[in-house]
């Protein structure tokens, strides 16, 4: 058989995909002319199969990725016709039957047999890449070096630091990130508003850019972070500014703010002297803005802690609250 006509198959849950799976994908793509990867759906899955299929498509660009979107028996004892059931489902899904099946587990042999293919074992003893999805699900932080970017973004712990104008949130969030060895997500609004002519398009358009930029920045940095993100502001804050400056909130911003998840939000009190700045607005409304933040966080059922005081006092309080919420005892455990 000519090398470029060999049809290869990999099948799995990939819950989540990890560096061992990437080794499997690359091995298969390097072996055969056409590789197909099938991502399984299972009942009660902690990570949706559509999400996992999207991850695998990103991580295996040389393969065709197919989503088997119905629950299948997982053990031979679950179905007296286990392999026949699997063979029928795969024959209906695959555009062509495979010549070879690649797997890092023994099930690859009977799976290949039911499809009339050869089994090619890949790192069965997990010697090349010693990791399993089970270990990752049990403790993602301990397995962090084995997680590819989209999976890191999924498991990254996120902390938001919010507050009114000139309440010290940027200083505090940057300090916390340094102290904990975490990744700092800067406030995108400042970058935009400091540009010449930033407001020429009007506040609705500017706020849309701010929200998109903040969301994109957080998402991008989550893919490369060491396990913990400290975010200088969030989209809930953007909704409040949108109401204050335009009287309305774009539906997509409101929805994105509601969908965002943070393990803790630190709310900086406006007890610091106001420091004038060209991109700071409405200093007289700081107390009202602080109160509105607290109301919205409570309504969203988001865990939060108010942080007040100056200098080291504020830092110590914030760090203690964050460590208690995340179970951190030292810099190393934030990774």
Image: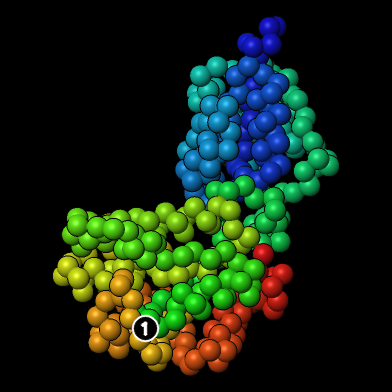
Image location of residue 200, percent across then percent down: 19, 57
- At horizontal 34% and vertical 63% (from top left) the residue drawn is 194
Q: How would you rate the neighbour count of disc 1 (Cα within 10 Å): few for under 14, some for 14-19, many for 20 or more?
A: few
Query: Residue 123 falls in which quadrant of the image?
Result: top right
Residue 232 locus on image (x, y percent): 45, 70
Viewer-nearest residue: 285 or 250: 285
Image vertical order of residue 142 relative to residue 106, above or below = below
Q: Residue shown at 53%/66% (left/top)?
A: 184
At x 53%, y 23%, the residue is: 94
- Quadrant of the image for the N terminus? top right
Residue at position x 23%, y 68% in the image: 242
- The single residue placed furthest to the front in the displayed view is 196
Q: Residue 27: name its quadrant.
A: top right
Image vertical order of residue 99 relative to residue 145, above or below: above
Task: State the residue position of label 1.
Answer: 275
Left or right: 98, with 70 as reference point: right
């Amino acid at each position: 058989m000519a090398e470029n006509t060999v049809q290869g198959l990999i099948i799995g849950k990939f819950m989540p995909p990890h560096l061992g799976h990437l080794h499997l994908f690359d091995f298969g793509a390097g072996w055969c002319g056409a590789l197909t990867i099938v991502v399984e759906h299972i009942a009660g899955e902690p990570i949706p199969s559509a999400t996992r299929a999207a991850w695998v498509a990103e991580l295996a660009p040389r393969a065709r990725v197919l989503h088997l979107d119905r629950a299948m028996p997982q053990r031979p004892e679950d179905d007296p016709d286990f392999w026949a059931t699997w063979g029928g489902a795969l024959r209906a899904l695959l555009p062509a039957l495979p010549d070879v099946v690649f797997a890092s587990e023994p099930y690859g042999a009977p799976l290949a047999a039911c499809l009339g293919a050869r089994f090619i074992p890949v790192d069965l003893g997990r010697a090349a890449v010693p990791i399993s999805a089970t270990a990752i699900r049990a403790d993602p932080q301990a397995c962090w070096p084995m997680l590819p970017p989209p999976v890191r973004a999924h498991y990254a712990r996120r902390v938001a630091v919010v507050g009114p104008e000139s309440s010290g949130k940027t200083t505090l969030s940057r300090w916390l990130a340094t102290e904990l060895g975490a990744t700092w997500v800067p406030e995108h609004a400042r970058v935009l508003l400091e540009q010449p002519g930033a407001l020429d398009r009007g506040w609705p358009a500017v706020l849309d850019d701010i929200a998109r930029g903040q969301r994109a920045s957080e998402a991008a940095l989550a893919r490369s972070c060491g396990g913990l993100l400290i975010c200088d502001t969030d989209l809930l804050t953007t909704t409040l500014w949108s109401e204050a400056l335009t009287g309305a909130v774009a539906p997509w911003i409101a929805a994105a703010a509601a969908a965002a998840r943070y393990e803790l939000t630190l709310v900086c009190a406006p007890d610091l002297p106001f420091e004038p700045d060209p991109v700071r607005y409405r200093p007289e409304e700081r107390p009202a803005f602080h109160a509105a933040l607290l109301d919205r966080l409570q309504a969203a059922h988001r865990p939060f802690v108010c942080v007040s005081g100056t200098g080291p006092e504020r830092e110590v309080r914030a760090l203690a609250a964050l460590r208690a919420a995340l179970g951190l005892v030292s810099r190393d455990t934030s990774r």
